[in-house]
Each structure stands twice: as structure tokens, then as C-alpha cells.
Amino acid sequence: MDISRTEPGGHPAEAAATGPSAQPPARTGRSGRTGRAGGPGRPRTQRSRQRLAAFGFLAPALAYLAVFFGYPLVQNISMGFRDYTVASFYTGAAPFTGLRNYTEVLGDPVFVKALVNTAVFTAGSLVFQFGIGLALAVYFNGRFLGSALLRSLLLLPWLLPLVVSGAVWRWMLDQDHGVVNTALRALHLAGGSAGVPWLTSPSWALPAVILANVWIGIPFNLVLLHGGLRAIPDVLYEAAELDGAGPWQRFRHVTWPLLRPVSGVVLMLGLVYTVKVFDVIMVVTRGGPANASQTLTTWSYQLSFQQFQFGQGAAVGNLLILITTGFGLLYLRSARAGLAEAAS
């Protein structure tokens, strides 16, 4: 015992534990070995291992994004600034042309037509898909006999391949033998015996593809909105009913405010999906007649694979990516504002 290091009036053991030369307690492991716990290198090594493990979990997702999203995106952007021909895929020679593809695309009269059609197609599809999907979700939120069966049957349009759905609607909208015109004739709404020229009239082609896309998109809206409705506690409706609120007031002051976050996600996903719809339009009208139902996606396809203007087709695709990215950023900004408002 070193008596000389003992403080006056203190215990020698206490001085040994609190003195400047006190050592950290030794920890005994399962193997019986003793070592210094809490050393300066141990937390750093543990953090390095955690970061390495996190990177290991992220690596497959990063590799997937790099191969299946990043590489095609970079190639498409590069193609938009080059003069790509059929021979370029064999020789690799694609001269750099700067913004020429973009100026030619923006100066083409079809661009304005395709842009307006894309906006009308997207807005019309979203309004009817969301409105009908919300009405059906509220209806099926009530418990009645056969609700689950009917809800399952409504999912069929979503389960069918888009090409099959487009082919079905092309037959249904046939002017002479389609079931839609047959029903309209029976109701004396077809405008004469000739029927409505859904697929051959420039005035009816765009409404025809919107009608087909609405039918396909309703189940998607129904499923997500119905899930959001099921998450609303019943006690809120009971309290509103006790306060004398009617069905419309309960929907306005209870259902809609609590369903708004889910509605934002549904509309955003619907927007991204609808802007890039290609299959249905190509099967039903092929963008015609006279570009009446031409959208940016179908025009990009025609430029690339029918007119072999690959650079211009890539330029149209890049413009479509910019438009979609802009809407995505707007959604993220509104979502952050909503979270900040809820936190405050």
C-alpha cells in the first residue's frame, strides 16, 4: 500500500480508485481473458463495423439502381445529344450534335399536340380514377354481405395485362359491333344508327383511351384508399355521430382530413404511372387518328422505332423524365411542409 498517495482524512483504497493514476476496471470475457474495456479504439471499430454492415445491406439495392436505372438513364441522356442511326448500334459512331435534337423536337408541331394530349390524358384519368376509387372505397368501408367478394372482383382490371385490357377495350369501342355503341343505341344516346366513332374520329380518340385507362386504374385507387379508410379509428366516427354530425359532415371533418396523406400518395403514384402510359394507347388507337391521341410516350416510340430518329426519340423521353421529376419534387416539398406543420 502506498501511504504517501493517501489524501489527508481519506481512505487509502478510495485514493487509489480516484487518483490520477487510476486505471479503468478490467473486464473478464467468456474465455476468461481480461482486457481493457472502453479503450479509445473499441467504439471506433464498432462504428466501422456497423457502417460496413449497413453498406452491405445497401449494396444490392445500389447495384440494382446503377445497372437497371442509372445506366439506361445515362445512355438515354447521351443519346439525346447525338445523331444516332441504325448503323450506330453496330459501328458505335454517333456524332455529337449538341441541342439539335431538342430544337427539332420542340419546333415540331406534333410536340405541342402530344404535350397537350399528355396533360389532358393525365388529368382526365386521375380525376375519374381517384373520384370513382374514393367513392367505391367509402362504399366498401361499410360491412355488408358480399363486400369482400365484390371488392375482389373489382380488382380484375388491375390483374389483367395491359395489352389484354387494351385489346378488350378496342373491341368494346368498335363503331359497328362494339358493346358500348350497342348499349348507347339501346338507350338512344348513340347519335344515330352509325354510333359513336370512338377509334376513328379525332374528337373521340382521346376520350376513348382515357375511358380505357380509367377502367384500368380504378382498382389501384380503390385498394390504397380502402386501406387508408380502415386505418381511421371507429371511435372518431362515433364521437362525431354523438355530436350530431351527418354522413357528409363525418366525411368532411373526419374521413377526408385523416385520408389526405394517403390521397397524396395515391395521386402522386397515379400521376407517375399515367404520364408514362404507353401500352393502352398503342393497342387502342396507336396514337391516331392524325395524332389525336398522341402522347409524349407514344411519340417517343414512333420517333425511335418507326422513323428511326433515335436521338429525337431519346430527347422526347428526357423531356418526359424532367416533367415527371418536377412533379416528384413538388410532391416531396408538399410532403415535407405537411410533416413540418404536423410537428409544430
Image (cartoon, rainbow, N blue to C red):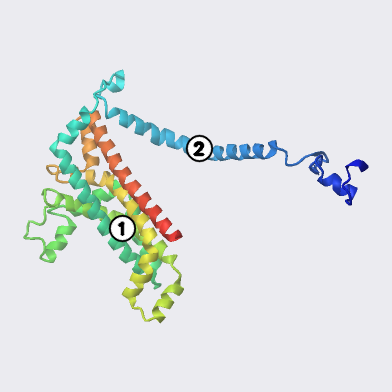
Q: Quadrant of residue 39?
A: top right
Q: Residues within 10 Å of mark 2 (few under 14, many from 20)?
A: few
Residue at x 10% of width, y 65% of height: 188
For the N terminus, the quadrant is top right
Q: Secondary structure at mark 1?
A: helix
Say whether residue 330 is visible: yes
Number of numbered discs: 2
- Residue at mark 1: 218
Q: Secondary structure at mark 2?
A: helix
Q: Which mark is residue 280?
A: none
Q: Quadrant of residue 32?
A: top right
Residue at x 14% of width, y 62% of height: 184
Residue at x 28% of width, y 58% of height: 129
* In the image: residue 118, left or right of residue 71: left
Question: Does residue 314 lie above or below 245 as drawn?
Answer: above
- Give the amino acid at mark 2: Pro
Question: Does residue 134 lie above or below 107 as drawn?
Answer: below
- Give the amino acid at mark 1: Ile
Distance Cα–Cα, label 1 vs label 2: 34 Å
Residue 325 or residue 35, whichever sits in front: 35
Q: Which mark is residue 60?
A: 2
